Image (cartoon, rainbow, N blue to C red):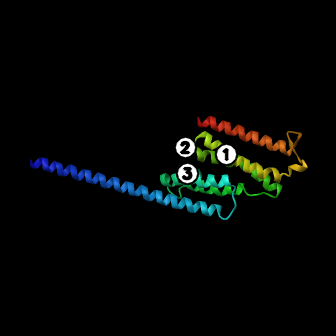
Amino acid sequence: MLQRFDAFLQQDEQNNEAALKDLRTSRDAEERRYIAIKDADTALQMQIGDRRLPKSVLELLQGPWRDLIIKIGEEQGVGSAPWSERVSFINELVSSVQPREKKEEVRMLAKQLPSIVVRLHKGLKQLGMSVDEMRKYLSDLEAVHMGILKPALNLKSGPTLRKKGQSVSAIDALLDMQDEMDEMLVEWEELAD
């Protein structure tokens, strides 16, 4: 009988230790989540600042991109390289949707867009977002960027750009760029599957 009682006490102690360990693990996870949320919100606020953003971009940043930063903060740590990369992307995205006045700024934006789209797609995929949801965000962003590029290229006056030895209107060049981006999106979707 005494042996049973000792065995019972030993089992009870092991159960209590396991419960205490689970409690500590849970508390640590809650603490990591709290820190990740707080730091994600601070990073968003700092990166956006007082710059005006289109509604779709603000929704993207405050929704899925915030969720991604929180997820990375919890899993890999706030301040880790992946976390820092996703936070710095906020500034790049916000800057990319600011108005451009000089043609050189427009050219630089056009060069940056493929990288921005690739990084955005990669982050949304990491979050586990469906292809249809990604397509919506990428399509909304494309519309914002096209809204910046078209006026900046002064399309009403019909400037021409050189493309493979041919004279091409600016709108044709923009449409070609849009087609190329659409083709890239299809390739990415195929890679995602």
Question: In this view of the protein, which residue sits in the foreground, 179 or 165?
Answer: 179
The furthest residue to the left: 1
Report, in whole angstroms, how far the alpha carbon at label 2 lies from the one at label 1: 15 Å
In the rendering, at what x and y percent does residue 5 appear? Answer: 13, 50
Q: Which residue is mark 1?
A: 138
Image point (64%, 38%), residue name: 188
Report whether 28 appears left or right of 178: left
Residue at 62% x, 43% y is: 134
Q: Is residue 179 left or right of residue 2?
A: right
Residue occupied by mark 2: 128
User: Residue 42: image x %, image y %?
Assistant: 57, 63
Image coordinates of residue 182 in percent, x first then y, are 71, 39
Q: Name which residue type carries label 2.
A: Gly
User: What residue is disc 3 on?
Assistant: 68
73 versus 136 height, above or below: below
Which of the two discs, 3 and 2, labels the residue nearer the N terminus?
A: 3
User: Can you name the residue that lies furthest to the front here?
Assistant: 55
In the foreground, 115 or 99? 99
Quadrant the C terminus occupies? top right
Task: Identify the amino acid type marked 1.
Answer: Leu
- Residue 31 found in image quarter: bottom left
Amino acid on which disc 3 is placed: Leu
First-in-chain label (3 vs 1): 3
CA neighbours of label 2 inside 10 A, class few (<14), some (14 to 19), many (20+): few
Q: Secondary structure at mark 1?
A: helix
For the point 26% across and 54% down, the residue is: 16
Query: For numbered disc 3, what is the local secondary structure?
Result: helix
